[in-house]
Image (cartoon, rainbow, N blue to C red):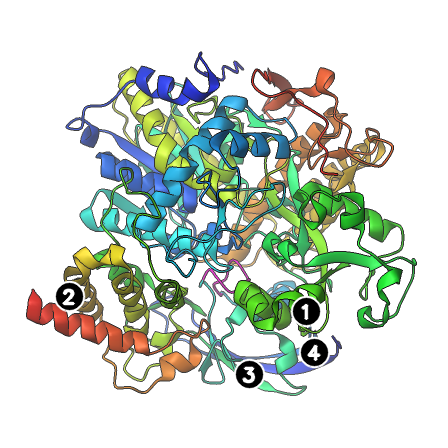
Amino acid sequence: MELNSNVPEGPLAEKWDTHRFASKLVNPANRRKYSVIVVGTGLAGASAAATLAEQGYEVQTFCIQDSPRRAHSISAQGGINAAKNYQNDGDSIQRLFYDTIKGGDFRSREANVYRLAQVSNAIIDQCVAQGVPFAREYGGTLANRSFGGAQVSRTFYARGQTGQQLLLGAYSTLSRQIHSGKVSMYPRKEMMELVLVDGKARGIITRDIITGELERYSADAVILATGGYGNAYFLSTNAMASNVTAIWRAHKKGAGFANPCFVQIHPTCIPVHGSFQSKLTLMSESLRNDGRVWVPKQPGDTRRAGSIPEDERDYYLESKYPSFGNLVPRDVASRNAKEQCDEGKGVGTTNLAVYLDFADAIKRDGETTILKKYGNLFQMYEKITDSNPLHEPMLIYPAVHYTMGGLWVDYNLMTTIPGLFAIGECNFSDHGANRLGASALMQGLADGYFIIGTSIAHYLGSGSLDPVNTDSREFTDSELQVQERIARLLRCCDGSPEGKVTVDEIHKELGLLLWDHCGMARNKEGLEKALAELPAIQEKFWNNVFIPGTGTELNQSLERAGRLADFLEFAEIMILDALERKESCGCHLREESQTEDHEALRDDAGYSHVSVWEYQGGQSAPTLHKEQLLFENVTPSQRSYK
Amino acid sequence: MTTTSISLSLEIWRQKDSRDKGDFETYTLINISTDMSFLEMLDVLNEQLTREGKDPVAFDHDCREGICGMCGVVINGIAHGPEPETTLCQLHMRHFNDGDTLVIEPFRSRAFPIRKDLVIDRSALDRIIQAGGYVSVNTGGTPDANAIPIPAPVAELAMDAASCIGCGACVASCPNGSAMLFTGAKISQLSLLPQGHPERHKRAMAMVTTMDKEGFGNCTNERECEAVCPKGISIRNIARMNREFVRASFLS
């Protein structure tokens, strides 16, 4: 597997411009002759599909939900970063670049991150022009707030619903192209297989979720925008249907998978409260602007928060990290919460929670101001927990949230399969070992609105593609593979469910294994144990899972089983990757590699690379390839937020 | 947070597919923790049905944080259930009592065909947006985001309207099956903001026409839509839509 990043030569600030000039173009009149498949309609997918259609390509777009507007980008709360420097507080493209690459603990590619910072400003302009109702100051200009890992206010927001508003902006722009006939929209269709013809990505096989029918679609290029794989852990902040299937199928057909062990555990989520729990709910990081994180100083203190006097509280983030305080990056905040709970200072019924307290902010700014900023989040918290954050501190605990790992892509966002592109969360490109808050929305829209168009033109303009036919052997074989897999899933479902297990039972088992051994802190022993226990869970799944119904109807158990089957296979490279990376970096804490005060200790000499896994057919172990990371413009330093 | 357990009797609409006639079936659930969400309660039922070798109840859901708009059923005659401004996924079992009987059925409307059990087809709402629920700008070449100042109260009002999650509860609750709250919210958002002004007439005409064509009814001020809207969208948005439509009829 060859890993050529295709980063252009020249000074960092000129690379994107140089690259655009060097890239091939497709004449506007010829673009209609090319077709592109886009899988997924979140920020990256919807913006890419709309933009490519505007440019003149024929686009076919797929999503598993009933409408493209429901993709999980819609749940992003806090905001979107851009280097506008509207607040005149010292921001610049260089600073956004530096914060992002430092936040990622120097495990991302300089050129990609710099380009992200460069296009960030145009994203805000674009969204405002679409009618996205960002928060504004009384003078009518755009408002900003600050976010973790930054000392400037560069985050644009629409209450606590920024993802919703940006996604509805992209969705409306996509809707306009559907209306014009340039985009064919296929909702409720799940991508089951990628089709390669002559080694190039030329189509997909989908399953119609309503009828169960398998269908074939061909194109000149395929773009995956299918999001992250956090649901491998069963409990996460992801939507229920978020899955690894599309990128895992692509991986099995030859796409390299980069840094699968880089999983972000978000520090401010509502704690787990019962075995019936189906998902975890995030409380936006923006709350850390005004909320103070604390635990009782005395381990095992069972008093109510209000009865613990000020001098018996430990505001551990403020005391440990005075310059960033409660706004340290997510990985640091999560790790510290876990450490406090491990020391017995956790609060709540399970002792797996810390306080996020707004009392001082309310005293300072008044209830009205605080409610204006966070009203909908407080309301959501109260609905779930039956407790009002105005009167009692919130209980929070880390939860799986975002996956920095994903398909390996070059500077063009193309995977190791020619003609297969990956954008948004499903690629690995911009966030290194840890993503800063308000950067996911930025990356999704940067990829879709401003980067992929150049890549597609360059790919299609570079060589001639033979016409393909969906009746060809390649399509027939791929469809057959899908049929066989579905038949295999349904195989053990005749007769009585006695002695069988449900899909969710197995999924919970996998989730717990990963959370315990490949979660916030990892060590060799635990990872090896997880690797040893995984095959038994896989076997139990294939031998005993019970799926009611058939494959030729709306069958939600079968959908979940198919996704779980892929999570079960994928988990192996996630654990292997965590085992292989013996350093700590960003969200990946190897307990063997820590500083004296329990901060992550990076090993730049040994691990300044992207780990890229190549599939070897399941029977043989996957092979590891490395893309060395070169830092010519920043000096990787031990991160310090003190 | 005090946790207790309750038992429930559920009468759930079962329908094999769009052609099937469908009927209610009764199920009993015991030991339901009041900390569960409504959908988690349905998960428990489905696990139980699966273990009995029966077909689980199909229902739509995704984010389970009240924002994607995918979930929604009618509980005892009320879309999204008894709690005001709450989606089904954010409704918790602590709002029900031990021994309650809950009648659970899909959002019903002429424009929303049932696909299976509680799963419906709301693509008609997408087609209303496709008719004109956007500002026609291509990617690139847009002016600086601060070039046009927008008064904060106007931006807030636009945001109120833009909060719509497209769940369709308004349609299911309206005796006329009207989608005017949904359509009015989008028309309002874009007519309040200066970016939406160049196309306001065309947009109002196109969206209202499509709404009629898709089989949605008209508004007769029943205000049922506003009462069940999980995002608290006001029927003032319908008034604004009507103003935009009348204006467009005279001026275009």
Same chain letter for marks 4 and 1: no
Residue under label 1: A363
Q: Which residues are magenta?
A: B59-68
Which comes before the other along the chain, label 3 or label 4?
A: 4
Residue ID at (37%, 79%)? B225
Chain letter of the residue beneath label 3 in the structure image: B
Residue under label 4: B30
Same chain letter for marks 2 and 3: yes
Secondary structure beneath dot 3 equals strand
Does residue B128 appear in this view? yes
Which image quarter is the N terminus of chain A in?
Answer: top right
Residue B71: image location, x then y, percent: 47, 66
For marks 2 and 3, give the CA distance.
41 Å
Identify the amino acid type marked 2. Met
Chain letter of the residue beneath label 1 in the structure image: A
Which quadrant of the figure has residue A197?
Answer: top left
Please say if the residues under marks 2 and 3 sit with CB atoms less than 8 Å apart.
no
Residue A103: image location, x then y, percent: 63, 35
**Pointer 2 local density, CA inside 10 Å: few below 14, some 14–19, many at least 20:** many
Same chain letter for marks 1 and 3: no
Residue under label 2: B205
Chain letter of the residue beneath label 2 in the structure image: B
Identify the amino acid type marked 1. Lys
